[in-house]
Image (spheres, helix red, strand yellow):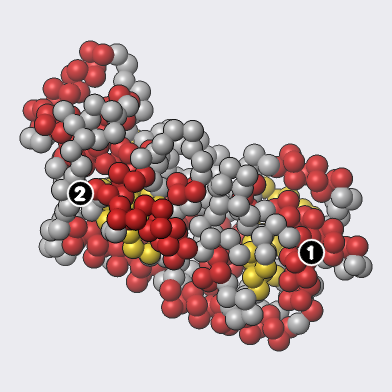
Amino acid sequence: MHSNFPKVGYVMKRYPRFSETFIVNEILAHEAAGYPVGIFALRPDEETHFQDILGRVKAPVVRIPDKIKNTEEFWQLLNSARARLPKAWDALATMDGAAGNDVAQAVLLALACKKQGIGHLHAHFGTVATTVARLAARLAGIGYSFTAHAKDIYFDYEESIDLDVKLRDATHVVTVSDYNLRYLRHRFRGDASRVTRLYNGLDLDRFAFHEQDNPDGAILAVGRLVEKKGFHILIEAIRVMREEGRAVRCRIVGGGEEAANLSAQVAASGLQDAVELMGPRPQAEVMAMMREAAVFACPCVVGRNGNRDGLPTVLLEAMALGTAVVATDVTGIPELVRDGQTGLCVAEGDPVALAQGLSRLMDDANLRRRLAKAGREAIERDFDIRINAARLRNMFAKQTVERPEPAREIA
């Protein structure tokens, strides 16, 4: 391991999560480069399906208990921190506004960092993972950084997640699109001065490009069955295409809270023979379906609560494999899907525009091939995980030297 590179502890609310392959890709890229990491999860695992790439991760997962039994146990924990973490007692004095459970987890995380020789903490999502990583870093006398994705930026939370404070005293912040970067810098001004755009990435050896042409294949969409994925718009677009006399088929892969509503929509539209809700599938199976698809659809929308996608990993995967895509103009998607250049990009929430884009691609083999080739080139240029993970490691190394002064009090 490079002498300037600190051992980094990755902090997540839950790990693993079926939909968060981008985190696993990042960890695997670090390990492939010879940089071991620690993995810490703050909540119990609730997944029923797991991606096959998880088996390649070498780092063990430390699950930080999310409940303290009683005040006596909490007091013993604080005494342990005072004995083993020289900066802990002074740090605790700055945490008056913090939730007790977050403080307890932070103490446990800081002690685990001490035991494992962790020199820096990096959290994914600016919510609870960053909250606890921030407190733990203060207790352990190390730095912390985080990646801000989408929901943590745009969702209208009932209680503040103190994103402004986290942006201000993190050693560095990464976000996954230029759209996010502009939004953060506009909303938070000087607090966002340490934010850098760094795209999520793929292992391009696993996602090898193959020129493909399957005009009789299905339209494929992949993602959690939640409002922001826009699958209700896709189903309506399929209805429009069927009314135009097109014998199209659509597969939607994923599970989630909108499954019953989407199933009811399919039935009400008389599309049982056209739209198949397939539930979650392993990544290898999804990749095979991407190669067989006529077109990949990514119909994201901004949810009623402000929630939206950043730049969906499945979109990167489809384009890397050589499948032509139709996507919507939500957040960072147009940075990758440049309309008429690397794919077709249509207005969000417009089933007619989506139907027109899908029909155009399915009717024009030359357009599909041209966009697929350009899409792969864009992935190779900006989304190679080996390159992007190396950039992140360089940030970690620099942050151990140039760590900003933390805020006086932690809210």
User: Is 18 on the left-hand or right-hand side of 397?
Assistant: right
N-terminal of the two: label 2 or label 1? 2
In this view, 25 is above or below 20: below
Image quadrant in which you'd find residue 2 = bottom left
Q: Position of residue 255 (x, y in %)?
A: 64, 45
Q: Position of residue 166 (x, y in %)?
A: 31, 45
Mark 1: secondary structure:
helix
Residue in view at x 45 percent, y 49 percent: 153
Q: Which residue is mark 1?
A: 352
Residue in view at x 51 percent, y 70 percent: 335
In this view, 116 is above or below 394: above
Mark 2: secondary structure:
strand
User: Is 319 on the left-hand or right-hand side of 233?
Assistant: left
Answer few, some or many: residues within 10 Å of disc 1's Cα (few below 14, many 20 plus, some between 14 and 19).
Answer: some
Q: Are marks 2 and 1 in contact (CB under 8 Å)?
A: no
Query: For the residues marked 2 and 1, what is the alpha-carbon distance in whole angstroms?
Result: 49 Å
Seen from the viewer's position, the closer of residues 38 and 353 is 353
> Visible in this render: residue 68?
yes
Q: Which residue is mark 2?
A: 143
Residue in view at x 23 percent, y 65 percent: 394
Q: Amino acid at mark 2?
A: Gly
Please tell me whether mark 2 or mark 1 is closer to you in this view: 1
Answer few, some or many: residues within 10 Å of disc 2's Cα (few below 14, many 20 plus, some between 14 and 19).
Answer: many
> Is the C terminus in the top left, top right, bottom left or bottom right quadrant?
top left
> Visible in this render: residue 251?
no
Q: Position of residue 319 (x, y in %)?
A: 57, 72
Q: Amino acid at mark 1?
A: Val
User: Is 313 on the left-hand or right-hand side of 33?
Assistant: right
> Is the N terminus in the top left, top right, bottom left or bottom right quadrant?
bottom left
